[in-house]
Image (spheres, rainbow, N blue to C red):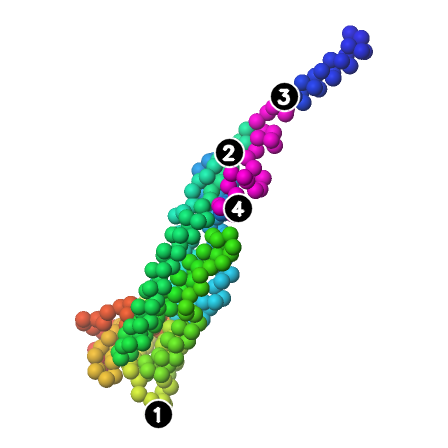
Amino acid sequence: MSAKSMSLTVLLGLGLLMAVSHGCGWSRSNVPSWIQGASPEYPAERYLTGVGQAESRTVAGERAYGAVAKIFKAEITAQSQDWESYLVLEKRGQTSTERHLTLDQITKVSTDKVIENVKLLDTWVDPKTGQHYALAGMDRAQAAAALLERMNELDQAVETELTEAHQTQDKLAKVRNLRRATKTLVLREAYNADLRVIRASGQGNPSAHRVADLTSELEQFMAEHLLVAVEVSGDQADVTRRAVTEGLLREGLPVISQNGEGTSPELLVKGAVQLWDVSIPDPRFRYARWCSDFVITEVATQRIVGAVSLGGREGHLTPSEAMSRAVRVMQQELTSHLAKTLAGYVYGDAVPPTELPPAACPAKDHVNR
């Protein structure tokens, strides 16, 4: 073959290769526009979208949904400083976290509601790599309408709860309605943060109330009208009383000082604690046992609204270390249960007991219950 013929063959081969490569499915001209950025099919002014990529269609779709949810979570986190006073109050007592409305719960409740409007809009598979792509999104107008409907319901609930709080003469009813109104308002504000994301204008619908104002009103009323007294007798009485007091304060429950002259409490937390060494045949450890029996009463009526009876055994290398550990565990357990019990009654999350639990301390030493 001549040099001229060889050159012609090479040129023809290169031309054929280029033609084939341009015709392949993985050329950039066949990639959906939504993968590369803006899409005329799903314009940003009408759709809020997220893209997911994975080795399977299912996972790619999940990641696309997650990309949309992430936008809302970021906005709620950014706005949470406006609800800080309420969230701090809710987080004070870590003893009963199942009752608390945390930022994670707020985000989940509102985001789940928004994600109901998200659909899988399109998918694509790159024939060269086998990677799956998914586009998830929502119609902004439809999602905003659904959100506004839910916000209107919450606004009505807030107004009803505040009206009841301000009209009642019952102190506990006032506290419970104020707390419910504040909690409802926090959720309403989370939806408003979502609305700002959904609307292309970034504008929401502000509420007639502020979370900080309602929180302040609740705390001030409780500090003036719902004081708690704590009385402890028995072993380690002083340190136990301090521990219980701190636990109640973390729950937002105002506790009067031990020598609160001229101050009448609404509720009394009263009980006894006992600690003693336990003789158990054990070559390595020494043991100490603890017990506590407490009741919570309404001072005016002497009605028992809560009761806690607990006990336990702790071990360590020496008797003194075992006793120290027993004291520490007793304070933690007792504080946790008393704070949860009292807060549950005050906030209306629990009903008073119909009968007292069995006493934890020996009959000869336990408090007159």
Residue 184: which quarter of the image? bottom left
Numbered range of the magenta stretch: 20-47
Front label number (2 vs 4): 4
Residue 188: which quarter of the image? bottom left
Q: Upstream in the sequence, badge 2 or badge 1?
A: 2
What is the crowding at mark 2: few (fewer than 14 residues within 10 Å), some, or many (at least 20)? some
Q: Upstream in the sequence, badge 4 or badge 3?
A: 3
Q: Are marks 4 and 3 in contact (CB under 8 Å)?
A: no
Return the residue at label 4.
44
Q: Residue furthest top?
A: 1
Amino acid type of the residue tagged 1 in the rendering: Glu
Return the residue at label 3.
20
Check if residue 22 falls in the magenta segment: yes
Residue at mark 2 to residue at mark 4: CA–CA distance: 20 Å
Amino acid type of the residue tagged 4 in the rendering: Ala
Instruction: Name the spot of residue 150 as percent of width and height, x first.
Output: 36, 57
In percent of the image, x 28 and y 76: which residue is there?
Answer: 167
- Height in image: 147 above or below 22? below
Front label number (3 vs 1): 3
Residue at mark 3 to residue at mark 2: CA–CA distance: 22 Å
For label 1, the SS is loop
Placement of the N terminus among the 4 image quadrants: top right
The number of numbered discs placed on residues in the rendered structure image is: 4
Instruction: Name the spot of residue 29 as percent of width and height, x first.
Output: 60, 31
Q: Are marks 3 and 2 in contact (CB under 8 Å)?
A: no
Residue at mark 4 to residue at mark 3: CA–CA distance: 35 Å
Return the residue at label 1.
261
Placement of the C terminus among the 4 image quadrants: bottom left
Front label number (2 vs 1): 2
Return the residue at label 2.
124
